[in-house]
Amino acid sequence: MADEIVEQQTALRQRIEATITGMFAPEDEGLRHSLQAAKEHGLPEIQINPIQGKLLQLFAKACQARQILEIGSLAGYSGIWLARALPADGHMITLELNPKHAEVVRASFAQAGVAERTEVLVGPAMQHLPELVERGPFDLIFIDADKASYPAYLEWAIKLSRSGSIIIADNCVRCFPALWAQEDRQGEIDADTQGLLKYNQLTKDHPELTSLLLANDEDYTDGFNVSVVK
């Protein structure tokens, strides 16, 4: 009986997600091409889902973003959602470590019709972030890269922001480990989880931020950390 209830609950969640996606966040050919390109080039299938993409778009519209920075590109899926929120003269910079992945991103942006308002910078994010000070401030910053570096990315995100900018980081729940204090668990935690744990703590206590953690994937086991710069 318990297994049957779990299956029913799972089916209901999936139906709700599919319905919301179909009504409010349908994928067009450009977005689907990005997903297919990721598969063809062997990139991990760890991109955000359509509802999260639409949520990013809403945040960008809410802060009237004209300048967006994305740290971590993957195949360009989230970048397409964000770039489509920009006005005609808006601009988005996305940082990608891997040169081959960067080519996939550029092709995905072109296919989705956002190439003219996007720029892909290749190399370590910590190398590029200091160089972007003169190109800021950015109205929205989306962080979805190596988790161990999230605290360092947050420090730079605040420097590159203005009052009212929105900083969003993905994967900040991680089935709860990113929420537990180290002293509450047995054994060591990996560097990624340590980074997420510190990021959540920093955003919760930072005097320049108002923040909230949103569990917004299908099973509520992961989601966005959203901060507004005061």
Image (cartoon, rainbow, N blue to C red):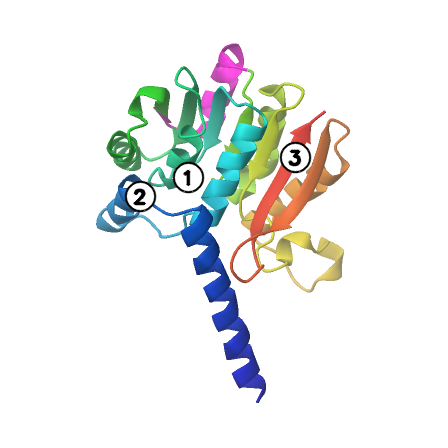
User: Which residue corresponds to the image point at 72% horizontal and 24% vertical from the top-left?
Assistant: 230
Residue 115 appears in which quarter of the rendering?
top left
Taking the spot 56% from the left edge, 34% from the top edge, the residue there is: 59
Q: Which one is in front in this view, the residue at disc 3 or the one at disc 2?
A: 2
Neighbours of disc 3 within 10 Å: few (<14), some (14-19), many (20+): many
Q: Is residue 143 visible?
A: no
Q: Does residue 107 appear left or right of residue 16 in this picture?
A: left
Mainly helix, strand or loop, the magenta region?
A: helix
Magenta residues span: 121-136
Q: Amino acid at mark 2?
A: Asp
Q: Secondary structure at mark 2?
A: loop
Give me the disc on residue 78. 1
Q: Which secondary structure, mark 3?
A: strand
- Which amino acid type corresponds to the residue marked 3 in the rendered image? Ser
Q: Earlier in the sequence, mark 3 or mark 2?
A: 2
Instruction: List the residue tagged with mark 2.
Output: 28
Q: Is residue 138 above or below residue 213?
A: above
In the image, which disc is placed on residue 227?
3
The mark that comes first in sequence, 3 or 1, is 1
Instruction: Give whichever of 80, 46 is nearer the camera.
Output: 80
Which of labels 1 and 2 is toward the front?
A: 2
Q: Residues within 10 Å of mark 1 (few under 14, many from 20)?
A: many
Residue 99 in picture, x, y percent from top left: 29, 32
Residues at marks 1 and 2, CA–CA distance in whole angstroms: 13 Å
Q: Furthest residue to the front?
A: 23
State the separation of the CA atoms marked 3 and 2. 29 Å
